[in-house]
Amino acid sequence: MIEVNNLVKTFDGFRALDGVTLKVENGSVYGLMGPNGAGKSTLIRHLLGVYRQDEGDVVYDGEKVWENVAVKSRIASIPDDWFYFGQATVKDMCDIYKGMYKTFSIERFKALKDAFNIEENKTIKYLSKGMQKQVAFWLALSTMSDYLILDEPVDGLDPVMRRRVWSLIMDDVSSRGTTVLVSSHNLRELEDVCDHVGIMNHGKVVLERSLSELQDNMVKLQVVFKEGEEEPTMDGIEVLHDSLTGRVHTMIVRMCPESAVKAVKKYDPMLVEAIPLTLEEIFVYEMGGLENEIKNILV
């Protein structure tokens, strides 16, 4: 389990992390989102033990990560700007990773060669950005680590390779219990893979819930009331948004789908239908006053 407790980091008087607290259960996939400058990359550097916090703790299974080689050896990462040595080939980086990780599996490395279809003797700097990212995944997945920390991991990959990479990651989650934390602006993609999601803003985690909790507590309704009758006031129903197209009301209601339909049916509408919300829609309406900032990450 990853536990971040009241994490604070200040750079030249700027509070980049302002009491961040979150928890990632073992064997789960946690999606971390937020607008640019929210503190996601700074948090990830603390999770990897690169930065030392001013206050608070970053703990893996009860052990602090800072200057703890044993903990760091259980973590593989793919940062947004993945590092490789300038003249290194794929095979050279494989040897480096093998020296860093006792759990590195040459058998897994060879088995994944077909998935990525890149020659081991290729110099990495001459590969395209997408192929370099594939090499990063190839090496990270070969470490057989307990924890995988990803920062905008599939940027630069084509749709087919994105699907293949996520399939490999999810196979590790299900078969080995790998714990994954992924930071991304792409909510649509994370919706398919995450168990829990958290959103950061101004150096804080302002919302942290499981996907099932989010989906059970909010629903989109399409409602048509009888013509000529006065529209009801919806007493007892928390309507976050209501738009009208013709005679069809589209309502965002903070309530589980079954209860919402039952509550609206009391007003005897001609039609009421519950439609599942996307993760994007849930965050926009859940965040309320932060709506405009949240929209910036949904592009």
Image (cartoon, grey):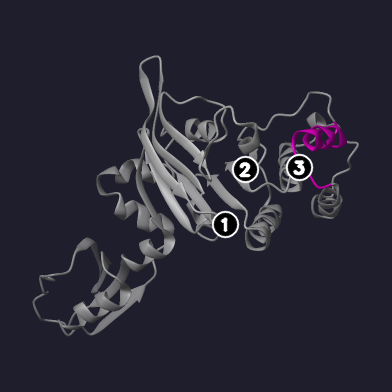
Sequence-wise first label, 2 or 1: 1
- Left/right of residue 130 with respect to residue 55 in the rendered view: right
Tell me if residue 286 is in the magenta stretch.
no
Task: Estimate the spatial distance between the alpha carbons at disc 2 and disc 1, rounded to whole Å.
Answer: 24 Å
Could one spot residue 236 in this view of the protein?
yes
Residue count near mark 1 (Cα–Cα under 10 Å), binned few <14, some 14–19, many ≥20: some
From what the image shows, is residue 296 above or below residue 259?
above
Amino acid type for the residue under numbered disc 2? Asp
Q: Which residue corresponds to the image point at 42% horizontal and 48% vertical from the top-left?
A: 198
Task: Give the residue at mark 2.
Answer: 155
Near-viewer residue (133 or 208): 208
Which of pointers 3 and 1 lies earlier in the amino acid sequence?
1
x and y percentages locating residue 221 in the rendered image: 29, 72
Residue 237 in picture, x, y percent from top left: 17, 69
Eye-nearest disc, 2 or 3: 3
Crowding at label 3, few (<14), some or many (≥20) Cα neighbours within 10 Å? many
Looking at the rendered structure, the secondary structure element under dot 3 is: helix
Tell me if residue 222 comes above or below residue 184 in the rendering.
Answer: below
- Provide the residue span drawn in magenta: 89-105
- Secondary structure mostly seen in magenta is helix
Q: Which mark is residue 27?
A: 1
Element on which disc 1 rests: loop
Q: Secondary structure at mark 2?
A: loop
Residue that label 3 marks: 139
Q: Residue at coordinates 84% horizontally, 24% vertically from top-left?
A: 87
- How far apart are the alpha carbons under marks 3 and 1? 20 Å
| Amino acid type, mark 1 | Gly
User: Which label is found at residue 43?
Assistant: none
Q: Earlier in the sequence, mark 2 or mark 3?
A: 3
